[in-house]
Image (cartoon, rainbow, N blue to C red):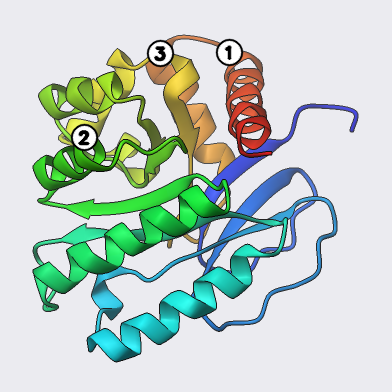
Amino acid sequence: MNSIPYIDIHTHPFKTETDTITVQNIYPGEGFAAFEGRNFYSVGLHPWHIKSSDQNNAKLMMIEEAAEFDHVIFIGECGLDKIAKTDLEEQKRVFEAQVFIAEEYNKPLLIHCVKAFNEIIGLHKKLHPKMSWILHGYNGNLQITKQLEKLGALFSFGYNLFNSNSKAIESFKYLPVEKIFFETDEFDGEVERMYLQGAKLKNISVEKLKQSVWENFNRIEITRI
């Protein structure tokens, strides 16, 4: 590898990349490609897709099956969403189950959180996970960010960095680069755009930011082995 690649830590569409390492999110039971050096995956049961406990348990078993593969590197996205029209108590049960899978298979947890940061913080304090928790599409305010940072959480930023009214910008500027990742999520574009905006907000070079995120990625990969 001649130069440090970009890392897109959370994307949904399949992308054939040459300069970027991608972590594509897949649904439990979906197929995924063999490892070719840059294509990693995350698998999890999203709070939007919560159904009956029996159906959810079947999906959890599929997550465990996928977790056997080395290039499925994260469990998630999973989490809590108070806007979702699914049962919140069942969301919590399924989320905790995925925390346990992440711990069992030594894989970081990729978290979707909408209006439930206090619950996520409470569950972290209750469960004491060893694996990293990564808040994806992060848009929390500075007070919440500081609480999550104290717990060792990591943060992935996406297109919110282009919204001048977003709480994400203040949090992004506050956080050290050792805590930061970038993602495209549903955005139909290159993660390079997030890096360029991030470098501008941090007042550092894109190369320095690429180096830091690359080190962050390798750090959590080494931790899970």
**Residues at marks 2 and 3, CA–CA distance in whole angstroms:** 22 Å
Which comes before the other along the chain, label 2 or label 3? 2
Amino acid, disc 1:
Ser
Amino acid, disc 2:
Lys
Question: Residue 125 got which mark?
Answer: 2
| Comparing labels 2 and 3, the label whose residue is closer to the camera | 2
Q: Residue at x 40, y 43 (%)?
A: 158
204 vs 222, nearest the viewer:
222
Task: Return the residue at label 1.
Answer: 205
Quadrant assignment, res 147: top left
How packed mark 2 is, by other alpha carbons closer than 10 Å (few <14, some 14-19, many 20 or more), is: few
In the shown orientation, is residue 122 left or right of residue 129?
A: left
Q: Residue at x 49, y 18 (%)?
A: 178
- Looking at the rendered image, the quarter that the C terminus falls into is top right
Amino acid, disc 3:
Pro
Question: Can residue 184 be seen here?
Answer: no
Q: Residue at x 58, y 13 (%)?
A: 205
**Residues at marks 1 and 2, CA–CA distance in whole angstroms:** 36 Å
**Residue placed furthest toward the top:** 203
Task: Return the residue at label 3.
Answer: 176
Q: Considering only vertical position in the picture, is 117 above or below 164? A: below
> At which x and y percent is residue 59?
43, 81
| Comparing labels 1 and 2, the label whose residue is closer to the camera | 2
Q: Considering only vertical position in the picture, is 132 above or below 54? A: above
User: Is disc 1 placed on a helix, strand or loop?
Assistant: loop
170 vs 148, nearest the viewer:
148
> At which x and y percent is residue 43?
51, 66
User: Is disc 3 placed on a helix, strand or loop?
Assistant: loop
